[in-house]
Image: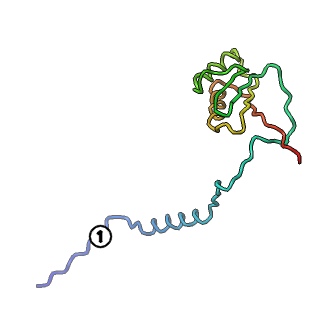
Amino acid sequence: MQFRRQQREQDGVNLTPLIDVVFLLLIFFMVSTTFTKESHLKLNLPEAAGPQAQAEPSMVEVLINADGSYAVDGRALINKKLATLKSALSEVSAGEYNRPLVITADATAEHQAVVRAMDAAGQLGFVHLSITTRQPEKN
């Protein structure tokens, strides 16, 4: 005796067209995206040809030496920690965080030292921040 097999009704949803559409979108975005190669950038800092800013008498100045040590308004700090820099900036500014803050860094100083100074200023609430540069030499 031969029994016919009963055909089952398909209970699930066919995901094949959905997967095809997702792959097509993925390929479209991969092809249409532009990739930048940041490794080919050559930076020559800290020269700038713009006009020199006028120094204000009530500004706070942070000096960063080549070894990454800090000095706030001419007074050297005991270490390179963020907390020390923040307390020195707070003491010198006396809570007046609307005063301009000028960061003067050596050209060979680590980028981390400059970022740490900017971070300390931002955490305290300084809004007028500038970085000093020198005029390029004319040959």
In the picture shown, does residue 74 fall above or below 115? above
In the picture shown, does residue 124 fall above or below 105? above
| Closer-to-camera residue (69/38) | 69
Q: Quadrant of the N terminus?
A: bottom left
Q: Which colour scheme is used?
A: rainbow
- Number of numbered labels in the structure image: 1
In the rendering, at what x and y percent does residue 62 appear?
71, 26
**Pointer 1 residue:** 9
> Which image quadrant is residue 73 in?
top right
Residue drawn 62% across the image and 64% down it: 32
Residue extending farthest right = 139
> Which image quadrant is residue 125 in?
top right
Residue drawn 62% across the image and 36% down it: 112
Residue drawn 69% across the image and 14% down it: 94
Q: Residues within 10 Å of mark 1 (few under 14, many from 20)?
A: few
Task: Identify the secondary structure beneath mark 1.
Answer: loop
In the picture shown, does residue 99 fall above or below 103? above
| Closer-to-camera residue (98/10) | 98
Kind of residue indicated by mark 1: Glu
Residue drawn 64% across the image and 39% down it: 111
In the rendering, at what x and y percent does residue 98 appear?
74, 22
| Closer-to-camera residue (16/42) | 42
In the rendering, at what x and y percent does residue 18 appear?
46, 65
